[in-house]
Image (cartoon, rainbow, N blue to C red):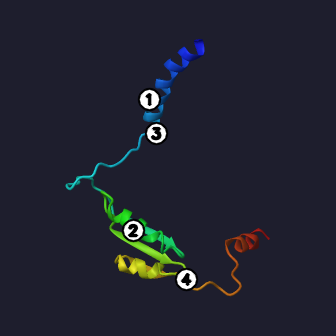
Amino acid sequence: MLGLILCILILPIGILSGMILFKKNTIPHSKISNIKHGKISVIIPARNEEKNLPRLLDSLFNQSVQPDEIIIVDDHSQDQTKHIAEEYGVTTFTAPPLPAGWTGKNKKRRENIK
């Protein structure tokens, strides 16, 4: 009986606490924005992201505060990543070719440790 009474008293407090602690903070959407900010640049490294890139770019273009520029750095994608980025009209760069024998960042770390 005591357990039931405690659950009835504590449960609403727990729910209310969760609502306060985990509420989603958003910037209200407004056609007239009086928020002043510096230039916003978004740089997106991408490799084989043709399935995710449209959703990401749509999300960026639908923000209440628009980025001033979006730059996609294509890292030798084997799919249509660069083509999709260009269709959205964002700036695209292709990463330079990797040096011969390159096996990744971990190799460079091992070289620096020695």
Looking at marks 1 and 3 on the same chain, the residue that comes earlier in the sequence is marked by 1
Residue under the point 62% across and 84% down: 98
**Which amino acid type corresponds to the residue marked 4 in the rendered image?**
Gln
Residue under the point 45% across and 70% down: 53
Residue under the point 75% across and 74% down: 111
Q: Which residue corresponds to mark 1?
A: 16
Q: Which residue corresponds to mark 2?
A: 57
Q: Secondary structure at mark 2?
A: helix
Q: Position of residue 26 (x, y in %)?
A: 36, 47
**Which amino acid type corresponds to the residue marked 3 in the rendered image?**
Phe
Whether pointer 1 and pointer 3 mark residues with C-beta atoms closer than 8 Å, the reply is: no
Q: Which mark is residue 22?
A: 3
Report, in whole angstroms, how far the alpha carbon at label 2 lies from the one at label 4.
Answer: 20 Å
Q: Position of residue 108 (x, y in %)?
A: 70, 73
**Relative to 36, 53 lies left or right:** right
The local crowd at label 1, few if under 14, some if 14 to 19, many if 20 or more residues have their Cα within 10 Å, is few
> How many labels were placed on the picture?
4
Establish if 54 lies above or below 3: below
**Which amino acid type corresponds to the residue marked 1 in the rendered image?**
Leu
**Which amino acid type corresponds to the residue marked 2 in the rendered image?**
Leu
Whether pointer 2 and pointer 1 mark residues with C-beta atoms closer than 8 Å, the reply is: no
Report, in whole angstroms, how far the alpha carbon at label 4 lies from the one at label 1.
Answer: 49 Å
Residue under the point 43% across and 82% down: 83
Q: Which residue corresponds to mark 4?
A: 78
Q: Position of residue 82 (x, y in %)?
A: 45, 81
Q: Secondary structure at mark 3?
A: loop
Residue sitting farthest toward the front: 1
Looking at marks 2 and 4 on the same chain, the residue that comes earlier in the sequence is marked by 2
